[in-house]
Amino acid sequence: MAKHAEIILDGKSYKFPLVEGSEGEIGIDISNLMEETGAVTLDFGYKNTGATKSAITFLDGDKGILRYRGYSIEDLAAKSNFLEVSYLLIFGELPTSEQLDKFSADIKNHTMVHEDIKKILDGFPSTSHPMGVLASLFCAQTAFYPESLDPNRSSELVYLSIIRSLAKMPTFAAWAYKNAVGHPVNYPDNSLNYCSRFLKMMFALPADHYEIDPVVSDALDKLLILHADHEQNCSTSTVRIVGSSKASIYSAISAGINALWGPLHGGANQEVILMLEQIKKDGGDTDKWIAKAKDKNDPFRLMGFGHRVYKNFDPRAKIIKKAADDVLEKLGVNDPTLEIAMKLEEVALRDPYFIERKLYPNVDFYSGIIYRALGIPVDMFTVMFAIGRLPGWIAQWKELRENKEPIGRPRQIYTGQNLREYVPLGKR
Ligand code: CMC
């Protein structure tokens, strides 16, 4: 195979080297394109642009493959747990028992948040969406740990920032929920594991005894694993681009939380449930809603369908569909929206519109159904995604630092006005 790609511009030929990834993907290295040709590439939504070399996550959208550090998502979801996967993503290898014990103990040591965080929380009206509260509280850590503003100070500080991020995320998330319902916050119970600790902070009421249901805690752990990383998606690219300016890890991750919030990204799980409920309320006619999704004059899209990268099937959706069936059965939940979801899926998968465009159910098509069965309110769905995605964001931020990547700064093709003369007020 050729070792370069050739671009001919104005009759002149330029050669650019090819780079090959460990799974055989080919990239054209155009780092010197502008310098050599004076031209830039144009790629809306970066659909064809590799922004970095990364050793964290491999995914093949056509074959439906997703691997973290070389381990298949199927294996990890079946055999591992969220903290183990977090360690793997961040440090590159599965931990030994001693390493995992230390990692887990370090996290437990930092689950408390500064008491003044409560004052910030108190400033938010209860109408605030928990994602906005979460992003704000996460960023507020820069105020409590000002040394984090210098991310290159030492590797000990980087480790501490990573531990603090993982430790405090469930506390912030549960407190964002408590703010929305107007309840007093709960403090972390360090006798519990990561997911159970979060569930207790979220659901325990002062006067009641809260019993952890292992079915709920295990299902949550699996969901977090499935969401833990997904290479250069919108929120991860945001974390990397903010991190590339050498802003603190807390600001970079806070930016990632905001990017995740949108309905085309992490917000889709919330939109799926709202959509299923709307269809149910409307009489449950799935054909009508499929027709709406296909109508170019109708802004409606089938939420939870389609993916920028997966054009065959989303391996996470396969695992999660089975998990949804298991959880609903174990908890004895009979959710009529699941039936609508299954009908929608069945109709869409037979419809040429969806087949031609390679639109399949993605991870969010079923995650909302599980979250609801676990008792998690709709507004918190995207927050759950953020808890899951945190180790991925951390790993990508750490890799960016270690690779000493330059500041992210895309180019553009300017299409505005050419130079014109200023017209004073009153003469316009
Ligand atoms: N319903 C109906 N039509 C769709 C849908 C959908 N959900 N998704 C894509 N299309 C159509 C789209 O109208 C376009 O048709 P045409 O070629 O005739 O103009 C074609 O399929 C390609 O769509 P696109 O928007 O160019 O594809 P994209 O790769 O830019 O967008 C997507 C991917 C996920 C944003 C999109 O499929 C979508 O909006 N899906 C619904 C939202 C959703 O479920 N998002 C969660 C993604 S998974 C979680 C995560 O990893 O963030």
Image (cartoon, rainbow, N blue to C red):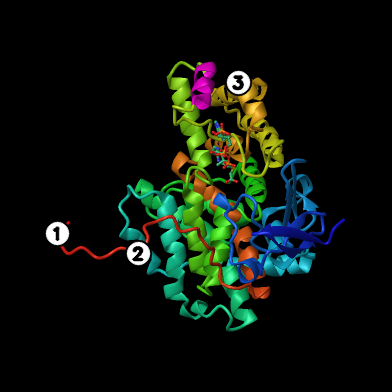
Residue at image coords 43%, 55%: 415
Q: CA distance from mark 2 to mark 1?
A: 18 Å
Instruction: Give the main secondary structure, helix, strand or loop, of the magenta stretch.
Output: helix
Where does the magenta region start and end?
286-295
Mark 1 surroundings within 10 Å by alpha-carbon count, few (fewer than 14), some (14 through 19), many (20 or more): few
Q: Which residue is mark 3?
A: 343
Mark 3 surroundings within 10 Å by alpha-carbon count, few (fewer than 14), some (14 through 19), many (20 or more): some
The reply to whether the magenta stretch includes residue 290 is: yes
Q: Residue 189 appears in which quarter of the rendering?
A: bottom right
Q: Residue 355 appears in which quarter of the rendering?
A: top right
Q: Residue 344 appears in which quarter of the rendering?
A: top right
Say whether mark 1 is within 8 Å of ligand 1.
no
Image coordinates of residue 59 in percent, x first then y, are: 73, 49
- The dot on residue 419 is 2
The reply to whether the magenta stretch includes residue 407 is: no
- The dot on residue 427 is 1
Check the image and report above or below for 397 versus 384: below
Say whether mark 2 is within 8 Å of ligand 1.
no
Name the residue type under label 3: Lys
Does dot 3 land on a helix, a strand or a loop?
helix
Q: CA distance from mark 3 to mark 2?
A: 57 Å
Name the residue type under label 2: Leu
Q: Is residue 322 visible?
A: yes
Name the quarter where the C terminus is drawn: bottom left
Image depth: mark 1 or mark 3 in front: 1
Q: Earlier in the sequence, mark 1 or mark 3?
A: 3
Name the quarter where the N terminus is drawn: bottom right
Q: Residue furthest front?
A: 11
For residue 260, side relative to residue 143 (left or right): right
Ligand 1 lies in which image quarter? top right
Q: Earlier in the sequence, mark 3 or mark 2?
A: 3
